[in-house]
Amino acid sequence: MDIKTKISIINQIPEIEKVCDSVSAFGEENGLSTKIIFAFHLALDEILTNIISYGYRDKDEHVIDINLSLQAGALALEILDDSVPFDPSEAPVPDINQPLEERKIGGLGIYLVKNLMDEVEYKSKDGINRLTLKKKF
Amino acid sequence: MEINSRKENGVTIVKIVGRLDAASAPDFSKQFTDLISQGEMTFVLDFSDLVYISSAGLRSILIVAQELRKKSGKLLIASLKDIVREVFEISGFIQLFEIFDTADQAIGQN
């Protein structure tokens, strides 16, 4: 059976650290490698920062739910939020081969997440975004 | 994050201890702005104690490197941990910088 945990936060930047601490604790309890935990910290940091900074049209408090589940040979993470729909697969891909002088500053966050994870799946239904990330170990 | 800087053989070694992310990137940028305004031009960024880096951290490194390039300065990078190296590889930063196994090697190369 999968081992699961659920973390709920509100749309404030300092809450991201709380989620990362929970992921660390979950990782330690279940003997996950530093590499796996690092990848999920990075993914949560990038995605939650985007949602909280750019995803809401009002100034109200919103809840973001994060579900972690340890499956056979993989760790899966689900982020559920009611922000503006954003499909990471449609995010522009940065040109990583430009020389230093011409290298653009932005666009690396989502690109890192897509490359560090084995699966990234996005669905939007009834105003709720559901982003699923999975990494094998 | 903690930043320690020292000078050796005309090279300024900046060591980052902890995390380089959205929260610490402004401190990182300020430290470099101060050092560059004091006339420092050749830097080794020692990442032996860097435990985490996000896109905000990468952005702050890129901005410093572009600024130094304009002034004909130099930014070398040393001691990447495996997880940080992977982020550098994915983002293409590995091709943008001269990367050394240790800070001493980077200082010696200058």
Image (cartoon, coloured by chain):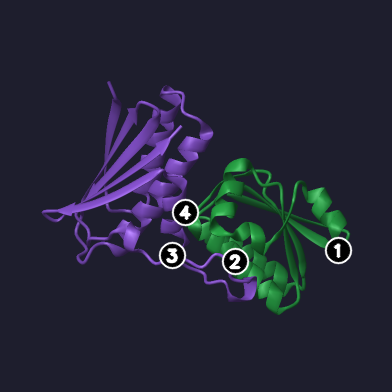
Q: Is residue B70 left or right of residue A80?
A: right
CA gap, disc 3 and disc 4: 10 Å
The chain whose colour is purple is A
**Snapshot quadrant of residue A107:** bottom left
**Badge 1 vs badge 2, beta-carbon distance below 8 Å:** no
Q: Is residue B5 above or below residue A58?
A: above
Image location (x, y in percent) of residue A122: 26, 51
Please, which chain is the residue tagged with disc 2 on? Answer: B
Sequence-first disc among 1 and 2: 1
Image location (x, y in percent) of residue A36: 47, 36
Q: Secondary structure at mark 1?
A: loop
- The residue wearing badge 4 is A112
Q: Is residue B83 above or below residue A13?
A: above
Instruction: Bin the neighbour count of mark 2 within 10 Å (Cα to Cα): few under 14, some 14-19, many 20 and up.
Output: many
- The residue wearing badge 2 is B62
**Snapshot quadrant of residue A101:** bottom right
- The residue wearing badge 1 is B10
Q: Secondary structure at mark 2?
A: helix
- Same chain letter for marks 3 and 2: no
Give the residue drawn at x 29%, y 24%.
A2
CA gap, disc 3 and disc 1: 39 Å
- Same chain letter for marks 1 and 2: yes
Q: Nearer the viewer, mark 3 or mark 1?
A: 3
Q: Secondary structure at mark 4?
A: helix
Image location (x, y in percent) of residue A40: 42, 42
Image location (x, y in percent) of residue B90: 54, 54
Give the residue drawn at x 43%, y 29%.
A27
Q: Residue furthest left?
A: A126
Amino acid type, label 3: Val
- Same chain letter for marks 4 and 1: no
